[in-house]
Structures are given as structure tokens and as C-alpha cells.
């Protein structure tokens, strides 16, 4: 069982690194909202693995709270995010996508 | 039997964690908000389900199972709504690449709505001239007939981006 826990820890750490990269860089507010949602899902995963490892299940209520807070946060931010996309903010990915669209 | 359940628990936990890793890869690699949204919803639905299944297999108690069902139902109700809100906001504010869409039925509607909003509340648009310019650019890209219509405005927009 300890092997599974270590493997889950490594996987979740890598996931957190990728998510925080997008959270810091993400060109728009909505990218950051999505990254925050995934970060919250990773926290929930870590809580679950921890519960199985310690064989004590009090933190299930914390999992409920995490699910609800993530929902309310992303809905609120998405409701009030009204910024137009700034043409100056287009990333290199965007340029590549447009090139591909032109080829098709 | 005990060993089998333990292995199954470990498998469920690892698959649930791998969903998070997949979402992180998708969020880093994918080009626009709608694609990232697609990747980001995976650990929240399937990943969480696998983790909850792992907990249920490890705990083997009815009270825990009831609470797990509550979490799962709440999440299933919440995730589509929040994803829809984020996607709606992303679509209306044009956080996507028109080149990726083969058909865009909502383009005219969104355009009309933006115009109505601008009429109702002129102060909300900080630079009217620039906003109109950007709208023209995107409407060129959104005709969606063929690649030629999208390839034409590309250099112009690239130059604008570097301005």
C-alpha cells in the first residue's frame, strides 16, 4: 500500500506543477479559473489518498466542502469575467492554431 | 479476497491520480480556453469517481458509502454547471481560436449581443475604436467557409499583436 501512496504522491506533485504553471502564466482570467478548479480537484485527490493511507475517514466532510467551494468560485468568477480578449495577448500557440486552420 | 480488494483499491487511487496528471498536461499544452476546459473537467468527474471508489473499497462501511454518494451527486450536479458558465463566458469574450471551429452557429448572435451591450452601456467599452477593429478581425475568421478566409487576415493580426 505504501508503494501506491508514493506513486500517487509523485503523480499529484507533477500535476500540481503543471497546474501552477498555467495558473501563473495563463493569458486570460478564465484560464486561471480552470487551473484553480483543477488545483482544487488535485487537493481533493490528495485528501482521498491520505484518508485511505491512514484508514480514517473523518475528512470526507472536507471533501464535500472542497467540491462546493470549487463550484461556487468558478461560477462566480465566470459570471463576472467580462474582459474582451486583447489582441496583444495572443500567445504563440494561438498563432500556430491559426496557421493550422489556414492549412485545412 | 483481502489482497484482491487492496490491489483494486490501489488501482482505483492511481487511475484517479493519473486523471489529475492528464488534466495538468492538457491545461499546459492545449491552446485555448475551451480546449483547456475540456481537459480540466476530467479529474473532477471521472478522477473523483475513481478516488471515491478506492475509498469505498478501503473503508467497506455503509456510513462512509452514504457520504461518498453525497459527494459524488454534489459533484455531478456542480461540475457541468460551472463548466458551462466558464465555457459560456469564454465563448462570448472570444477566448478561442476561430480556426479550430468547423462551424460556429452562435457567431452572429454573440456579435449582435455585444453590439446591444455596447449601445446600452457605452462606458463599459474602454476603447471603442479598437474594440470594433477586433470584432471585424474575428468576424472575418468566423465565416468558417474555408481556410482561405482565415489565412488572409493572419499577417495583419500578427502585426497588430506586436504593436
Image (tube, coloured by chain):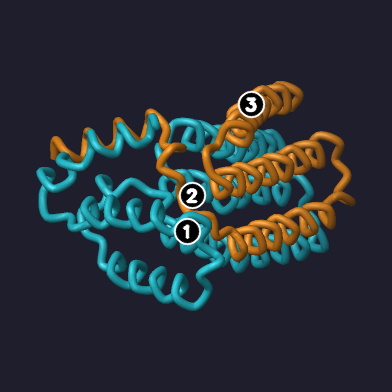
Chain colours: A orange, B cyan
> Dot 1: few (<14), some (14–19), or many (≥20) neighbours within 10 Å?
many
Residue B69, quarter of the rendered image: bottom right
Q: Residue at x 67, y 66 (%)?
A: B74
Labels 2 and 3 positioned on one and the same chain: no
- Tell me the tag on residue B31: none
Q: In this view, does B137 lie above or below B83?
A: above
Tell me whether circle 1 and circle 2 mark residues in contact (CB < 8 Å).
yes
Output the chain of dot 2: B
Query: Dot 3 falls on which chain?
Result: A
- Residue A48 shown left or right of residue A102 in the figure: right
- Residue A19 image offset from top left, x and y in percent: 61, 34
Percent of width and height locating residue B39: 47, 44
Does A37 sit above or below residue B158? below
Q: Is residue B134 left or right of residue A14?
A: left
> In this figure, which residue is indicated by the disc labeled 3?
A17
Residue placed under numbered mark 1 in the picture: B87
Location of residue B92 (image quadrant): bottom left
- Determine the chain carrying the residue at label 1: B
Q: How crowded is mark 3: few (under 14 residues within 10 Å), some or many (20 or more)?
A: some
Question: Image point 13% across, 48% down: which residue?
Answer: B149
Nearer to us of marks 3 and 1 is: 1
Instruction: Residue under label 2, please give it.
Output: B37
Circle 2 crowding by C-alpha within 10 Å: few under 14, some 14–19, many from 20? many
Secondary structure of the residue carrying numbered label 2:
helix
Disc 1 to disc 2, C-alpha distance: 7 Å
Residue at horizontal 38%, vertical 49%?
B96
Secondary structure under the numbered disc 3 in the rendered image: helix
The front one of B24 and A96 is A96
Q: What element carries label 1?
A: helix
Describe residue B46's horizontal placement relative to residue A58 as left or right.
left
Amino acid at each position: 500500500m505504501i508503494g501506491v501512496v508514493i506513486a500517487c504522491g509523485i503523480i499529484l506533485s507533477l500535476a500540481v506543477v503543471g497546474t501552477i504553471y498555467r495558473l501563473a502564466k495563463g493569458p486570460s482570467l478564465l484560464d486561471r479559473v480552470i487551473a484553480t478548479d483543477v488545483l482544487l480537484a488535485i487537493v481533493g485527490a490528495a485528501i482521498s489518498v491520505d484518508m485511505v493511507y491512514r484508514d480514517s475517514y473523518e475528512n470526507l466532510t472536507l471533501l464535500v466542502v472542497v467540491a462546493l467551494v470549487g463550484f461556487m468560485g468558478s461560477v462566480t468568477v465566470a459570471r463576472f469575467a467580462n474582459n474582451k480578449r486583447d489582441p496583444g495577448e495572443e500567445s504563440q500557440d494561438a498563432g500556430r492554431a491559426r496557421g493550422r486552420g489556414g492549412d485545412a | 479476497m483481502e489482497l484482491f480488494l487492496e490491489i483494486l483499491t490501489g488501482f482505483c487511487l492511481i487511475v484517479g491520480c493519473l486523471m489529475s496528471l492528464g488534466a495538468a498536461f492538457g491545461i499546459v499544452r492545449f491552446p485555448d480556453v475551451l480546449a483547456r476546459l475540456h481537459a480540466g473537467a476530467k479529474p473532477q468527474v471521472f478522477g473523483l469517481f475513481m478516488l471515491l471508489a478506492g475509498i469505498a473499497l478501503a473503508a467497506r462501511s455503509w456510513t462512509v458509502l452514504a457520504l461518498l454518494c453525497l459527494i459524488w451527486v454534489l459533484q455531478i450536479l456542480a461540475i457541468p454547471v460551472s463548466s458551462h458558465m466558464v465555457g459560456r463566458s469564454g465563448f462570448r469574450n472570444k477566448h478561442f481560436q476561430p480556426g479550430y471551429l468547423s462551424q460556429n452557429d452562435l457567431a452572429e448572435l454573440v456579435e449582435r449581443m455585444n453590439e446591444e451591450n455596447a449601445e446600452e452601456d457605452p462606458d463599459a467599452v474602454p476603447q471603442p475604436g479598437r474594440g470594433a477593429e477586433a470584432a471585424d478581425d474575428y468576424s472575418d475568421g468566423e465565416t468558417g467557409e474555408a481556410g482561405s478566409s482565415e489565412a488572409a487576415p493572419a499577417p495583419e493580426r500578427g502585426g497588430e499583436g506586436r504593436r
